[in-house]
């Protein structure tokens, strides 16, 4: 029962995180998608271990670290945070220019 719940959470969480990244809603949203991917990796590790599915568990141990690196890159790295803030300001200005017919 718990394995099935973990698997469904993992599947739906993976879909949601991938959709957030594919939606290209900005670096901050992408960072939160990596947070979700990291949480989902833990669920997949637990489901794999409980269900004797070692390949899924091992794959998600690796994905946990890859996704954790994504969290660092998009949300926690001080240099990247400054770059994100500047990029978002430029993006907002560009969006306004396009909306106003200035670009």
Image (cartoon, rainbow, N blue to C red):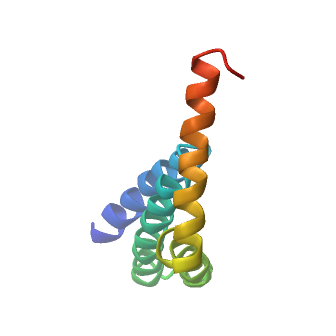
Looking at the image, which is closer to me, 43 or 50? 43
Q: Examine the rendered structure and indicate whether residue 64 appears above or below residue 89.
A: below
Looking at the image, which is closer to me, 64 or 48? 64
Q: Is residue 55 left or right of residue 36?
A: right
Residue 23 appears in the picture as rendered = no
Q: In which quadrant of the rendered image does the N terminus lie?
A: bottom left
Q: Residue at x 42, y 74 (%)?
A: 47
Q: How many marks?
A: 0
Q: Residue at x 51, y 59 (%)?
A: 85
Residue 74's image quarter? bottom right
Q: Examine the rendered structure and indicate whether residue 12 appears above or below residue 37.
A: above
Task: Give the farthest residue toward the left.
Answer: 1
Residue 75 appears in the picture as rendered = yes
Q: Residue at x 59, y 72 (%)?
A: 80
Rendering coords of residue 26 (x, y %): 54, 48
Looking at the image, which is closer to me, 42 or 23? 23
Q: Examine the rendered structure and indicate whether residue 8 appears above or below residue 62.
A: above
Rendering coords of residue 79 (x, y %): 58, 77
Q: Is residue 88 left or right of residue 12?
A: right
Q: Residue at x 64, y 22 (%)?
A: 98
Rendering coords of residue 87 (x, y %): 60, 53
Q: In which quadrant of the rendered image does the C terminus lie?
A: top right
């Amino acid at each position: 029962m718990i394995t099935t719940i973990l698997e469904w959470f993992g599947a739906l969480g993976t879909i949601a995180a991938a959709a957030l990244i594919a939606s290209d809603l900005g670096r901050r949203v992408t960072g939160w998608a990596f947070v979700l991917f990291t949480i989902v990796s833990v669920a997949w590790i637990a489901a794999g271990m409980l269900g004797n599915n070692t390949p899924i568990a091992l794959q998600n141990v690796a994905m946990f670290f890859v996704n954790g690196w994504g969290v660092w890159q998009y949300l926690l790295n001080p240099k990247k945070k400054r770059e994100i803030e500047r990029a978002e300001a430029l993006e907002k200005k560009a969006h306004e220019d396009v909306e106003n017919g200035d670009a």
